[in-house]
């Protein structure tokens, strides 16, 4: 029998296979990972969600104040005889007849937004052990705080209307885009199926995935292909609610049956309540009757120009990343290289993406910051397919977040009240988006995806 050193020497000479007995290696057993190791997880929790709140951050926050309404002067003082109360006076001519301004009233109550969370006492204890996430309640509290602000951000950017994707009664009918929150009031419009109605329908539940199934009271049966629009919000008024008008053609469907209809805002609702080119319309809407087209610099220029015609001074272009990239591409032929440094525009609590002025990364267009936000809504066509995102051109001097109650935090550890061994928490805020002027804001829609 060869010794061990002889085995090694013979192995080096390529003779191992002849000298090792058959099955020698098959008899060996190794201690493996599965025998001794159980995965444990660190206490850091990574959030795989988009928690950006850009539009919320750029809006100025002001106290709600002692009233829920405000007045809008919609016409100058007029002389009932000569038509003008401001006019030249000749040497011995009469002075203008005294007239009066025209005032309109708008009102909107503050809206309450709440975010709840909780953890059982067992989860709280186990979270502190090896492999746990640490303080389970604190983790949930941190996540809920982010979710609370994100909810307000998303409500501000909800669409005011969309197309009905699946016809049917409550709990069957569904929409192509998530534009509502529970408690919102809606109506429908359009000649498709003749189902347009002036009856308020109030949402009690919304499906979580596309198509979003709606459960509501009011008794209507939704018709596939018609337009569904918000009449009033339970939550924050959105910028899309503000920039709207009656009787538009959306996704190829004219909102003219029954009557001229369009999304409501604040206390301005009802038939033909938001006629185009009036003080209470959505101001400047550059649409294409549901047919998608490319964003162009001419469209941007028109939106900016018409706002300035109305006496506004646009200071923000807001869109999603798809149209942001297209605007960047439009400006590429005009690229001018700056010797050093990035051009970054500060805006409220946010800043635009870094870039050179009219360079490949667009920081401004005509001196107006361009802010991409992933929550900006997309258009929709007659086939229930998303179009490109909207492009909003805004004068934010007339857009304020009126804060009635800054965000509050409450915690409840009463097991008897909960009838369970749990700790519960609540973040809540009371606020509303106020637009003191509608006609100095614009949106460009019906854009190609």
Image (tube, helix red, strand yellow):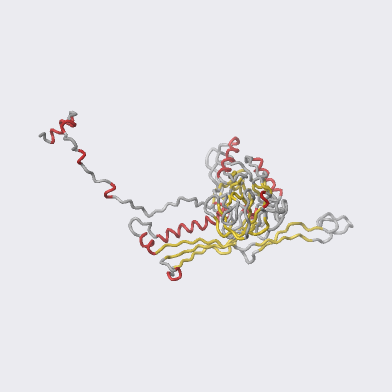
Q: Residue extending furthest top? A: 13
Viewport quadrant of the C terminus: top right
**How many numbered marks appear?**
0
Q: Can residue 322 be seen in this view?
A: yes
Residue at image coords 53%, 42%: 342
Residue 281 relative to residue 357: left or right = right
Q: In this view, does 109 lie above or below 382?
A: below
The spot of residue 256 in percent (x, y) is 70, 51
The spot of residue 319 in percent (x, y) is 59, 47
Residue 188 relative to residue 35: left or right = right
Residue at image coords 76%, 59%: 102
The spot of residue 371 in percent (x, y) is 57, 47
Viewport quadrant of the N terminus: top left
Q: Residue extending furthest right? A: 92
Q: Can residue 307 be seen in this view?
A: no
- Front position in the image: 445 or 95: 445
Residue 91 relative to residue 295: left or right = right
Can you tell which quarter of the image residue 110 is in? bottom right
The spot of residue 288 in percent (x, y) is 67, 43
- Front position in the image: 339 or 321: 321
- Front position in the image: 288 or 205: 205
Q: Residue extending furthest bottom? A: 416
């Amino acid at each position: 029998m060869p010794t061990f050193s002889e085995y090694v020497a013979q192995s080096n000479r390529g003779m191992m296979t002849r000298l090792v007995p058959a099955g020698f290696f098959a008899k060996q057993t190794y201690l493996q990972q599965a025998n001794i190791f159980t995965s444990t997880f660190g206490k850091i929790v990574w959030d795989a969600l988009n928690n950006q709140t850009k539009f919320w951050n750029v809006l100025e926050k002001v106290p709600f104040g002692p009233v829920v309404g405000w007045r809008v002067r919609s016409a100058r003082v007029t002389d009932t005889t000569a038509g003008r109360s401001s006019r030249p006076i000749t040497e011995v001519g009469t002075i203008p007849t005294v007239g009066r301004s025209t005032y309109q009233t708008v009102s909107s109550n503050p809206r309450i937004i709440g975010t709840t969370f909780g953890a059982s006492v067992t989860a709280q204890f186990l979270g502190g052990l090896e492999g746990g996430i640490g303080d389970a309640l604190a983790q949930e509290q941190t996540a809920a705080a982010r979710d609370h602000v994100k909810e307000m951000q998303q409500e501000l950017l909800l669409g005011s209307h969309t197309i009905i994707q699946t016809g049917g009664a409550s709990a069957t009918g569904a929409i192509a885009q998530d534009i509502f929150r529970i408690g919102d009031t809606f109506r429908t419009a359009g000649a498709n199926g003749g189902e347009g109605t002036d009856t308020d329908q109030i949402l009690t539940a919304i499906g979580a995935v596309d198509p979003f199934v709606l459960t509501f009271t009011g008794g209507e049966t939704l018709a596939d292909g018609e337009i569904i629009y918000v009449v009033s919000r339970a939550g924050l008024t959105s910028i899309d609610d503000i920039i709207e008008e009656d009787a538009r053609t959306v996704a190829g469907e004219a909102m003219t049956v029954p009557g001229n209809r369009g999304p409501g805002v604040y206390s301005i609702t009802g038939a033909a309540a938001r006629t185009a080119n009036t003080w209470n319309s959505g101001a400047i809407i550059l649409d294409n009757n549901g047919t998608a087209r490319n964003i162009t610099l001419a469209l941007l220029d028109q939106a900016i120009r018409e706002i300035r015609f109305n006496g506004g001074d646009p200071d923000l272009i807001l869109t999603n990343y798809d149209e942001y990239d297209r605007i960047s591409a439009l400006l590429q032929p005009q690229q001018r290289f700056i010797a050093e440094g990035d051009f970054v525009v500060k805006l409220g609590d946010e800043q635009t993406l870094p870039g050179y002025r009219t360079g490949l990364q667009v920081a401004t267009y005509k001196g107006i910051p361009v802010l991409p936000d992933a929550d900006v809504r997309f258009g929709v066509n007659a086939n229930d397919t998303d179009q490109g995102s909207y492009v909003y051109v805004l004068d934010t001097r007339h857009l304020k977040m009126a804060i009635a109650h800054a965000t509050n935090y409450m915690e409840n550890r009463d097991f008897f009240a909960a009838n369970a061994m749990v700790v519960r928490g609540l973040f809540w805020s009371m606020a509303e988006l106020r637009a003191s002027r509608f006609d100095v804001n614009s949106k460009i829609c019906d854009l190609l995806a």
